[in-house]
């Protein structure tokens, strides 16, 4: 299921000539995403596919494409979610059947051609490259897979704070920079507790789908507003804490919905910052939340993680002796620290001198760049 479409979203954008066009984003269950836009066409042949425009003189002299955007978000999105991105014939056939006109005049040629040709082509390339990279990891290549037991260690004090907030049924804001381990902490805390996890980086329709699946709510053919009302009614009768993770630059629509959920059940939010320009419109509702910051690893927690790495991953034993240096090198951030452990698993470094530490940091940065490229 890793190469199946998780969400599809479109918006209006301007092409190189300043004309409105459609820009769409496709995300896979493997977290691979691709974005593309189609320039507005100038051909007027007799067999030309229909270019759907709003024809509203108040916006871009009638050339706006909000109708085409709506075609993707309301019709094509529901057809695309769950489809295998590597089998393009199936979504292509579904889109053509949904339009059912020779010149694509119902949904517009731009939404169908844009999604079918441009976005899927890009996301297919990325999916295949990620698969290739993962295969090299698992097949005895230079990179070796990490043991999942190292995904989370330490954090006793932070877990204690979360436990107190959970017992008091408080709204909680878990803060910390990228790589500090907020998601790992939240998932470890709720491993044996009941909650609903929602990724707020997805569109509102996908957030609603996650809640509906967890609450066993069947939305049928209801619109977004009716679906929100149905979910809020279900949440009012139960006792389910809701976790909104990866919260950043929230739209007014998503922020209002999150606030309505907080009026029914305890809500926990994971985000990098509580600054208005970073967290978005949810900022105005954060006065009711208890702030708990995920701090960098202490020296004790760093030693704990490195001890586990020596025992489980069989990295060089003298790593623990140089725990203070590695903590300084990673800034106490678990993400970079794990990246250093990966390098120590692959090579032996002379950690007692600055040249060995510099080489370790350089290799980590190179492999981080290679990972982003794939």
Image: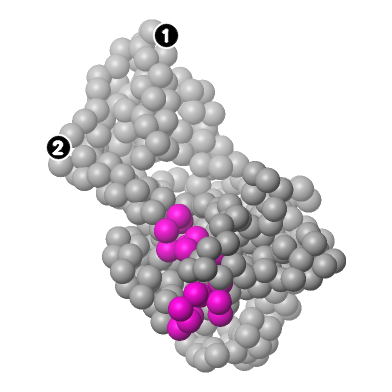
Q: Is residue 86 left or right of residue 245?
A: left
Q: Which residue is mark 2?
A: 140
Residue toward you, 231 or 360: 231
* Residue 354, position as x, y percentages in the image: 42, 8
- Residue 51 seen in the current view: yes
* Label 1 residue SS: helix
Up-down: is 175 above or below 322? below
* Residue 44, position as x, y percentages in the image: 57, 62
Q: Is residue 333 left or right of residue 360?
A: right
Q: Which residue is mark 1?
A: 354
Q: Earlier in the sequence, mark 2 or mark 1?
A: 2
Q: Nearer the viewer, mark 2 or mark 1?
A: 2
**Which image quarter is the C terminus in?**
top left
**Which image quarter is the N terminus in?**
bottom left
Range covered by the magenta-colored residues: 98-119
The residue at 50%/47% (across/down) is 181
Q: Residue furthest right?
A: 58
* Label 2 residue SS: loop
């Amino acid at each position: 299921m890793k190469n199946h479409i998780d969400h599809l979203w479109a918006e209006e954008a301007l092409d190189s000539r300043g004309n409105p066009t459609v820009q769409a984003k496709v995300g896979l269950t493997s977290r691979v995403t691709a974005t593309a836009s189609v320039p507005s066409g100038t051909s007027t042949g007799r067999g030309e596919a229909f270019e759907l425009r709003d024809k509203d003189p108040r916006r871009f002299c009638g050339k706006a494409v909000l109708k085409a955007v709506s075609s993707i978000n309301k019709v094509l999105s529901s057809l695309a979610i769950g489809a295998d991105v590597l089998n393009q014939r199936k979504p292509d056939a579904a889109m053509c059947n949904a339009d059912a006109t020779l010149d694509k005049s119902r949904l517009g040629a731009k939404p169908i051609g844009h999604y079918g040709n441009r976005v899927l082509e890009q996301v297919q390339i990325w999916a295949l490259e990620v698969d290739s990279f993962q295969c090299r990891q698992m097949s005895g290549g230079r990179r070796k897979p990490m043991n999942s037991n190292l995904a989370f260690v330490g954090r006793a004090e932070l877990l204690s704070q979360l436990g107190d907030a959970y017992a008091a049924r408080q709204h909680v804001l878990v803060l910390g920079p990228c790589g500090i381990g907020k998601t790992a902490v939240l998932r470890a805390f709720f491993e044996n507790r009941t909650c609903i996890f929602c990724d707020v980086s997805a569109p509102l329709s996908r957030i609603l789908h996650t809640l509906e699946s967890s609450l066993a709510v069947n939305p049928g053919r209801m619109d977004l507003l009716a679906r929100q009302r149905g979910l809020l009614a279900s949440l009012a009768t139960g006792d389910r804490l809701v976790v909104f993770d990866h919260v950043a630059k929230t739209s007014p629509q998503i922020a209002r919905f999150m606030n309505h959920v907080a009026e029914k059940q305890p809500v926990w939010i994971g985000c990098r910052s509580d600054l208005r320009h970073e967290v978005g419109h949810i900022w105005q509702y954060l006065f009711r939340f208890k702030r708990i910051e995920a701090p960098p690893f202490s020296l004790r927690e760093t030693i704990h993680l490195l001890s586990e790495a020596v025992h489980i991953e069989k990295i060089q034993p003298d790593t623990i002796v140089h725990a203070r240096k590695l903590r300084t090198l990673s800034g106490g951030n678990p993400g970079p620290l794990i990246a250093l452990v990966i390098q120590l698993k692959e090579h032996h470094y002379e950690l007692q001198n600055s040249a060995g530490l510099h080489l370790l940091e350089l290799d980590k940065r190179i492999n981080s760049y290679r990972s982003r490229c794939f």
